[in-house]
Image (cartoon, rainbow, N blue to C red):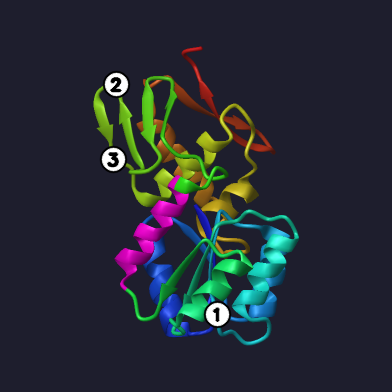
Amino acid sequence: MRIVLIEDSERLAKGIVNALHDQGHAVDWLPDGTEGSRFLEAEGADLAIIDVNLPGLGGFEIVRALRARGSHIPVIMLTARTELGDRITGLDAGADDYLGKPFEMAELAARIRALSRRKPDIQTGETKIGRLRFDRVSRSLTGPDGPIDLPRRELALFECLLDHCGRIVSKDRICDKLYGVGADIEANAVELLVSRLRRKLSGTGATIRTARGLGYLLDDDTR
């Protein structure tokens, strides 16, 4: 999942980014509300975590602008302002959830999972391809010989390709999904990930094909 975090506290933001990276998510962090709102409008996200008190545009204004554009991106608001009136304001603005500071990273992760189950634009449940079964809630992959344990980057790559099964996904799109928009990574990083994942999927009926100059696609060889 690609998550946009708009939070002006560098210490808190780094903690959230590290925790979400460990769970296999790509995170784009923006410390300014105006820049964050522009980024969301231009790039979108699977989910946004937005602080209320921000330099530039405030969190409530960012969410209102999102909803006014017709965006259904799930939003979790973060704030030290835990009064009932503030919570109501955030929810009325269009936020899906509200988390008061301080909080445990495990709780934030649980709320992200809860939103992923509730929102129709984030796929949930079990998906089958070839002789593979992928549980999107637990993010577990099972093949004909049992569970397939994938490191977080390979798991995120598999999810990205599965979301576009049978269609070509460009290398740039994969980079954005796995590392965040504009991340500075080596040119062959995606190629190495694809090569490792391809070997692990061998014999499962799910094949990663290369469209030279275009990208990659995940195909079901059992059909």
Tag 1 residue: 52
For badge 2, the amino acid type reads Pro
Task: Tell me residue 100's x, y (percent).
Answer: 40, 77
Tag 3 residue: 149
Q: Is residue 114 above or below residue 81?
A: above
Residue at image point 41% right, 37% down: 197
Residue at image point 66% right, 72% down: 62
User: Marks 2 and 1, Cα distance to the nearest angstrom?
Assistant: 47 Å
Q: Which mark is residue 144?
A: 2
* Res. 59 in view: yes
Looking at the image, tell me whether mark 2 or mark 3 is earlier in sequence order: 2
Residue at image point 51% right, 12% down: 223
Residue lying at the far bottom in this picture: please name it: 55
Q: Secondary structure at mark 1?
A: loop
For badge 3, the amino acid type reads Asp
Q: Taking 144 as reference, is 42 left or right?
A: right
Segment colored magenta: 104-117
For badge 1, the amino acid type reads Val
Q: Nearer the viewer, residue 48 or 24?
A: 48
